[in-house]
Amino acid sequence: MDNTHEARDTTRKDMIRTGEEYIASIRDGREVYIDGERVDDVPSHPMFKPLVDVRARIYDMQHETATAPLMTFDDAGERFAVGLKLPRTARDWWDKRRAADAVFEDIAGVVTRVGDETIGEMWSLFDGQDVLNEVDARFSENIRRHVERAVAADPFHVSANTDPKGDRSKRPQEQDPDMLLHVAKETDAGIVVRGAKYETAAAYANQAFTKPTIANWGDAELSDYAVGFVCDLGSPNLKFICRTGFAGRGRREDYPLANRFDEVDTLVVFDDVLVPWENVLFYRHTRAATYIRATLHRYSAFAFVQRILKTADMMIGAALFNVRQTGLDRQPAVQEKLAQLAVYREGINAHLTASITLAEPSPGGLVMPNQSLLYTGRVHACANLPAMVHVARELCGGQICITPDEASFRHPEAGRWLEKFYTINDEWVADDRRKLLAFARDLLNSDYAGHRLTFQLFAQSPPFAHLGAVYRNFGWDGPLDFVRKSAGLSDAVTGGLQLAGGDEAVRRYYADDTAN
């Protein structure tokens, strides 16, 4: 991957960007801090540069002959990014899946917050325009315009959800009100917001869909916190305070994933930031706030789960290489553990595939992955990930935590002994074995690996919320109706419930002559 980009000025707005244009766009004087220092230049800083380069590479793939057909679509003779396209057919979801896979193959790794995984949250609000119209028709106009702008202008779009929270046994008004982002005042130009949000990749992105985390508002006093807007991340009075990155903590040869794919998380401080009215998507509207929290991942869960599928491929590959090089893949006990990883991987694949095949219309006229299958797939992927990481650790063996670093292999004296003890045969020489063990350690056992495991657990809300989404979207009527008939219960017991959820989607699929 080419990591060299020279920034240049551009006024082009209405076509897919290049990597150079993206890099130039984040050189806007934003106030970014990391490791106790203010960052002079985000794109060249060693902890941001790897992911800035990855995002720039994605933009460049949209222009290259080999990848442009996968990464873009044609609309009236103009090319636009597939990842940002409003999904109106099931084919759109296959195209999005193929585009994301093309990125992972090109960069030889997995990245999550690069735009396609977060833009779907805007589509959820697009579906809720009738809710927005209850307060002000301008809000639904704003969401339509921003969804269209995302496709046309091709910004790096992220999502701001989580607040610092404070004491959650108290209401916001009973403590420092800034613990939850809120509107401090209204002006003719827009609203002024104060507080903070955590957001992965915000320090090197262009805009964020900023919204509340509270779902149970309780009373109208919380209305100042019921606000959602698109935030230009180059706005005055924003401060980005980032966690220490993993890039640069160790040599790339020893930590190949941490040094290329660490997506830096940021506390974004809103120190009286003006949000123009045209960027406000809802305000003083507790129902809209509750709606967006309930439907937030209706679309974005697909891209999120697809990332875990690719991570499962990485675990399988690392484990299988490790057991094959020593001949352990012939042992039934080892084959059993490899099969466990395969079942996990194919379970994710099956949910993604079925959710497209049985895609369903959304309230706003879009096409969304089958909700019951998508959300159960997310639970399967996230809930079983820690156990699968441990299975992969077992298969990779203890050497992933005791192997010396690359510098020792190059040392004239130490390297002589390491060459002897790490060479297995003519196919697996010491250097390749070291590379495999370093990769497996960074994937499964390093600080970066632990961080990623926690990120997957909470990135799209905690496990109880994942199960809550399943509860709200599963077709309970089908099992109830079947038991009513089987047990001979009267129609009054269930009110004559009809098939719903996944069962109804299957019925519609086979009833549609065009489906096959």
Image (cartoon, rainbow, N blue to C red):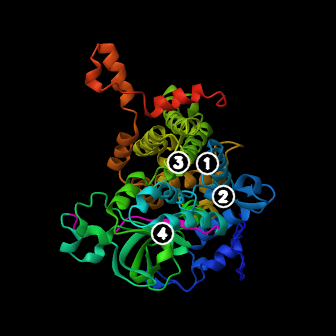
The secondary structure type at the circle numbered 2 is helix
In this rendering, the answer to whether 96 lies above or below 338 is below
Q: Secondary structure at mark 4?
A: helix
Q: In whole angstroms, how far apart are the C-alphas of marks 3 and 1?
A: 15 Å
Q: Which residue is mark 2?
A: 107
User: Which residue type does callout 2 highlight?
Assistant: Ile
Relative vertical location of residue 127 with respect to residue 317 in this rendering, above or below: below
Work out whether residue 263 can be spotted.
no
Q: Position of residue 466 (x, y in %)?
A: 38, 47
Residue placed under numbered mark 4 in the picture: 138
Q: Which residues are magenta?
A: 154-168
Q: Residues within 10 Å of mark 2 (few under 14, many from 20)?
A: some
- Marks 3,2: beta carbons within 8 A: no
Which residue shows up at 40% across the image and 78% down it? 269
Secondary-structure class at tag 1: loop
Q: Position of residue 506 (x, y in %)?
A: 52, 28
